[in-house]
Image (spheres, rainbow, N blue to C red):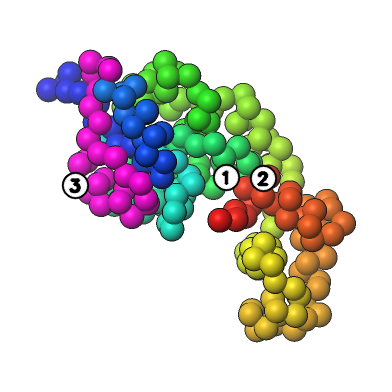
Amino acid sequence: MHNRRIRVLCVDDHRIVREGVALIIKRQTDMDVVGMAATGEEAIELFKSCHPDVTLMDLRLRGMSGVEAIKAIRRIDPSARVVVLTMYQGDEDIYRALQAGATTYLLKDTLADDLIQVIRDVKAGKQPGVSPEVQARLAERSVRPELTPRELEILTLISQGMQNKEIAASLGISEATTQVHVKNILAKLDVRHRTAALNVALRRGIVHIG
């Protein structure tokens, strides 16, 4: 039984990407694609029914995010091996995915041979290191001031186009308190105004739009 094929679940909201990755995997004599999912919800159901050895997970999914799907899968099976395969390069995206329990983090420009090797390593119980690029992003994040849950909440509302008055009403806090939070957000992101704060937050993956 030790030479059983590696069972892989592919999760990506773009059909062409799912099928392209599946094609690379199917060419391997030691691997099978046991499921393909377009959403986090589908991924969780397929994980339960297919019992993959390795799940390839994109972070950008409609509805439930890839990070939420990783957490849910790891709740079902704490030993689940999830490899993130995404275009997201923000330090916050990387940090959240690894915190959620992803085994490693690959960018979509990863070469097919490297992807296959990572799947084999992960199945063998090895912990593949992240690329120097991903490592550099994590190192940058470690020296930056972290936003509080409340500040993240406010930044998300700013990304939805809300002004301070609307944010205050939405969160049940005073406008003055909202202004203090916004001021702290600007300071932590090292910017002078809300538009710049939003640009930095989007680039780093602190918030996402759409």
**Which comes sooner in the sequence, label 1 or label 2?**
1
Residue type at mark 3? Answer: Ser
Dot 1, crowdedness within 10 Å: few (<14), some or many (≥20)?
many
Point out the residue furthest to the right here.
Answer: 192
Dot 3, crowdedness within 10 Å: few (<14), some or many (≥20)?
few
Residue at image position (79%, 61%) is 194
Q: Secondary structure at mark 3?
A: helix
Query: Is 92 situated above or below 63?
Result: above
Q: Pointers 3 and 1 in contact (CB under 8 A)?
A: no
Q: Position of residue 169 (x, y in %)?
A: 67, 83
Q: Which mark is residue 68?
A: none
Q: Which mark is residue 204?
A: 2
Q: Secondary structure at mark 1?
A: helix
186 sits to left or right of 75: right
How far is disc 1 from disc 2 in space, using C-alphas? Answer: 7 Å
Residue denoted by label 1: 93
Q: Quadrant of the N terminus?
A: top left
108 sits to left or right of 184: left
Q: Which mark is residue 49?
A: 3
Over which residues does the magenta segment extend?
Answer: 27-51
Residue type at mark 1? Answer: Asp
Q: Position of residue 113 (x, y in %)?
A: 42, 15
Dot 2, crowdedness within 10 Å: few (<14), some or many (≥20)?
some
Name the quadrant containing residue 62.
bottom left
